[in-house]
Amino acid sequence: PFEITPDGSTVVNAADHDTPGDQELYRVPITGGTSPKLSEHLPAGTLVWGVDQIGPDGLSVLYHTRRPDEDTWGLALAPIVTGPNTTLAAPASYDPLESSLFSPDGSTVVFQANRDVPTEFEIFSIPSSGGTVTQLNGLLVPDTDVWTFEITPDGLTVLYRAYEQAHFGAQLYSVPIGGGERVRLTGHSESETEIGGFAISPDGATVVFAESEGWQFHELLRMPITGGQPTVLDSMEATNNYTGFLGPLFSADGSTIVYRRSVYPLKRELYSIPATGGETKRLSGPLSSSSSVDAPTLVPGGTHLVYRANPESYSVHELFAVPLSADGDADGTLDACDDCLDQDGDGFSDPGRPQDDCPP
């Protein structure tokens, strides 16, 4: 496992450079060179088990440790240049860390672990400088988890999907990143619903999520991040247990939502829709009933989407790229913005100008 710093200059990876079998944390210039060790003073038998994330300023890295003989796990932070490591979650039994994220300003770390109940993964926050660990989620239905979580762009709120007691199915909740009152955003209708994947808009104002009703009817919905009446973007009736919407994500400018529609056990197609609603557009090419689109990923800048699919053979997967916006006249400006002022040539009308009369 490895991560690359935001400026692209350095790779941070876990390896057993010094002692075979003893995996530790190192950094190396992306052009190659010496590889100083970043993890320090690990207890005997403790290994660096994963590189989680590099901080937004590129100066520190989150990593988790494991001691196999005791089955204990921990979470730590290391400076990428030099300095002491900070233990964020002390090694504990039954504590395999699932994921951890820096807040956008790097001041807080949110992580998922089964610290208190071995069969239940919950979410916690802690200052990145160390300190008190705070549980964020409420009481879960026994033997269920907080399945996914995201931090809002302003770093103040965590949204998570969980099966909390007294509420039917997995629902969407929000909670301050430092802990506090939790708000249930979904599951207020009389119907029994279940929430699937969700995504937060780049401006932090909107959340888009997939919802199923009794496993018979599925909707892709948009709602203010603070809650309220959702707006239906797309819907479909179930034809089998595999029907549904998967993995919504926003384009970099927040104008477009990309998602997958699952219609057969193995057939998942890629679609887009304007974030404000409107006509859906299929992005993936023709697929057989046993073909599927996986791992849709936005390229930096958000003009294109890369995805993996197996359109011709079940066992052969290929990579594809598809534009999210069109520039049919190839003038360097998106077609929707041809009549707008675009002095910086980024394909969008320049913000803050009277001529900014073009939708992004």
Image (cartoon, rainbow, N blue to C red):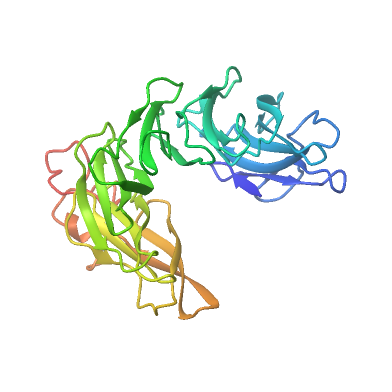
Q: Is residue 88 above or below residue 151?
A: above
Closest to the observer, 337 or 100: 100
Q: Is residue 331 left or right of residue 202?
A: left
Q: Is residue 102 above or below residue 126?
A: below
Closest to the observer, 258 or 246: 246
The spot of residue 244 in percent (x, y) is: 34, 60
Question: In the rendered image, is residue 249 in sight?
Answer: yes
Q: How many marks?
A: 0
The spot of residue 9 in percent (x, y) is: 60, 44
Q: Is residue 57 left or right of residue 333?
A: right
In the current view of this chain or complex, which residue is farthest to the top?
Answer: 131
Residue drawn at point x = 84 percent, y = 37 percent = 45
Residue drawn at point x = 47 percent, y = 34 percent = 140
The quadrant holding residue 18 is: top right
The quadrant holding residue 104 is: top left
The spot of residue 85 in percent (x, y) is: 70, 26
Question: In the rendered image, is residue 154 in sight?
Answer: no
Residue drawn at point x = 27 percent, y = 53 percent = 220
Closest to the observer, 172 or 75: 172
The spot of residue 115 in percent (x, y) is: 62, 30
Q: Is residue 122 left or right of residue 96?
A: left
Residue drawn at point x = 80 percent, y = 36 percent = 70
The quadrant holding residue 356 is: top left
